[in-house]
Image: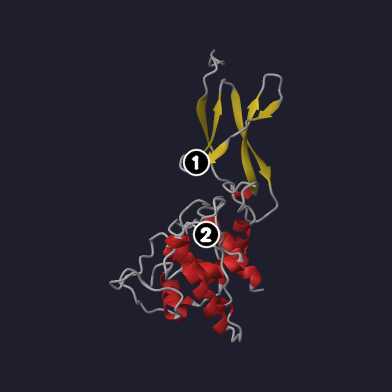
Amino acid sequence: QITELGGTKITIRLPCAADAAKKVKGYYVVWLKEDGNGQRMAGAAFNTTAKAMEFETDHLSVFAIAYTENTAVNQYYDVAETSWYAPYPTFVTENGSFQGTSEATFGPDVTMTRGMLVTVLGRAANVNTGSYSAASFSDVSPSKWYGGYVQWAYENKIVTGVGAGKFAPDQAVTREQLAVILKNYTSWKEKSESSTKDSTKQTQGANYGDQTKIASWAKDAVKFTGDKGWLSGYPDGEFKPGKSATRAEVAKVLTDVMKEGR
């Protein structure tokens, strides 16, 4: 019976099926010792591709997956409690603007697409997609889950196409594009609520280390979302305008937008 590996570490994966019925807050791996006590394995994490708990060990033994119960209705086991985005997935799920990538996963690092973005904005605004049955883009069918939301966003000047009559719904949204869409969304919302204010003109803006990389058409929007605290720079002082936005980032932004609009 081999138990010791001579100091060499190996990676072990334990299959882990999502079980939303348990109201799981977080999974972890336990080393079951011969004396009957358990020790939590540091560094164990859920591998979304393999659908397994993955960890390193320098010995072979009996390992088990355990979980912490949570009373929250919408809690995902791929959202670590210590992550900067921890509070946001639950909020945007409970208000119906987002859905998880499965019953128990949120997919925080999954890239946000153009189709996904207009959909969550439309849901947040309680848009009646039945009123937007036209098809202004050749690559967007009204029958698609995002079809009505794309048409709503286009008719209300929240988004534009990418050229040649296309919208590119599966294309990743960059941070500077996200800033522009959020600015346009704010303008639409203020007009639809018959507001006399125009908060989109009140911009000062931060100076980022990569300021020159921000497209001219996005500069005002980047300033606006920065002033609002919705989109800010990274620790290195850069905005990274061409970087794809993730579901976690958009969940955070949408939470801020919705709470401000209360």
Quadrant housing residue 261: bottom right
Q: How many marks?
A: 2
The residue positioned 50% from the left and 28% from the top of the image is 11
The residue positioned 62% from the left and 32% from the top of the image is 42
Q: Give the percent coordinates (x, y) of residue 129.
A: 47, 76
Q: How is the image coloured?
A: secondary structure
> Which mark is first along the chain, 2 or 1?
1
Work out how far the residue at label 1 is from the one at label 2, CA to CA, in angstroms: 39 Å
Quadrant housing residue 146: bottom left
Helix, strand or loop status at disc 1: loop
Q: Which amino acid does the dot numbered 2 rest on?
A: Tyr
The residue positioned 52% from the left and 23% from the top of the image is 9
Q: Which amino acid does the dot numbered 1 rest on?
A: Lys
Classify 167 as above or below 67. Answer: below
Residues at discs 1 and 2 in contact (Cβ within 8 Å) = no
> Which of labels 1 and 2 is toward the front?
2
**In this figure, which residue is indicated by the disc labeled 1?**
51
Graded by Cα atoms within 10 Å as few (under 14), some (14 to 19) or many (20 or more), the crowding at tag 2 reads: some
Q: Nearer the viewer, residue 240 or 204?
A: 204
**In this figure, which residue is indicated by the disc labeled 2?**
208
Q: Nearer the viewer, residue 75 or 226?
A: 226
Q: Give the percent coordinates (x, y) of residue 144.
A: 39, 67
